[in-house]
Image (cartoon, grey):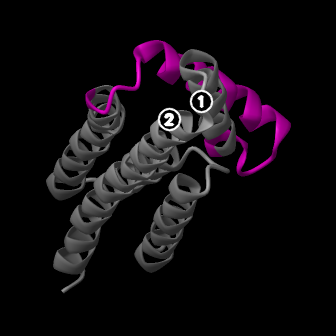
Amino acid sequence: MNDALLNLLVGLALAVSAVGIVVPILPGTLLAAGALLVWAVLTGGPVAWIVLAISGVLLGLGQVLKFLLPHKSMTAAGVPGRTIVLGWIAGIAGFFLIPIVGLPVGFVAGVLIAEVLRLGQWREAWDSTWVAMKATGFAIMIELGALMLAASAWFVAVLSTSL
């Protein structure tokens, strides 16, 4: 395969991955990892494998941090773990019930309902839900940042090998 075409297709896959992270239509990180793996296999050589290793570490770290850090901020704000679990269950259900935006909508709705049931007041429940919404945005930014760092490593490798 032509190197320019391969690089164009990988760049396109990385851009689609970013869209898949922001709008959960596709598994963005998985798509990016797959594209970088295909690029490394077809390109070959130590640079490609080093970039794949670096990208894999960055993407993996992003996956871990996107769950740990927002969870920590939610529990620090007083949102109990049970509410977070109920939010995730509702998010998974929402993913299947509402195409494209169901996961975040279901998560937020699940947190709101769980907090209304726990606290008995809409205002306090909304405060907890707002914390959950910010945490969800933070998780998306963490995953997107990891993707951008991995894509940057790939882009630097492409530029350095084509000069």
Please name whichever residue, 34 or 117, is drawn nearer the observer in this view of the structure.
117
Left or right side of 144 for 2: right
Please name whichever residue, 1 or 133, is drawn nearer the observer in this view of the structure.
133
Residue 118 falls within the magenta-colored stretch: no
Left or right side of 73 for 144: right
Q: Up-down: is 11 above or below 138?
A: below
Residue that label 1 marks: 121
Q: Up-down: is 92 above or below 63?
A: above
Residue 32 location (% of width, % of height):
45, 52
Please name whichever residue, 161 or 67, is drawn nearer the observer in this view of the structure.
67
Secondary element under disc 2, as helix, strand or loop, is helix
Amino acid type of disc 2?
A: Glu
Which quadrant is the C terminus positioned in? Answer: bottom left
Residue 82 falls within the magenta-colored stretch: yes
Residue at image location 47% in from the left, 53% down from the top: 35
Amino acid type of disc 1?
A: Gln
Residue that label 2 marks: 124
Within 10 Å of the Cα at label 1, are there few (<14), some (14-19), or many (20+) other Cα atoms?
few
Residue at image location 67% in from the left, 50% down from the top: 25
Q: Main secondary structure of the magenta part?
A: helix
Secondary element under disc 1, as helix, strand or loop, is loop
**Quick check: marks 1 and 2 in contact, CB under 8 Å?**
yes
Res. 155 image quadrant: bottom left
Residue at image location 80% in from the left, 47% down from the top: 99
Residue 80 location (% of width, % of height):
41, 18
Residue 156 location (% of width, % of height):
20, 72
Residue 59 location (% of width, % of height):
31, 44
Res. 48 image quadrant: bottom left
Magenta stretch: give its range: 76-104
In the rendering, which numbered label is found on residue 148? none
Within 10 Å of the Cα at label 2, are there few (<14), some (14-19), or many (20+) other Cα atoms?
some
Residue at image location 67% in from the left, 44% down from the top: 105
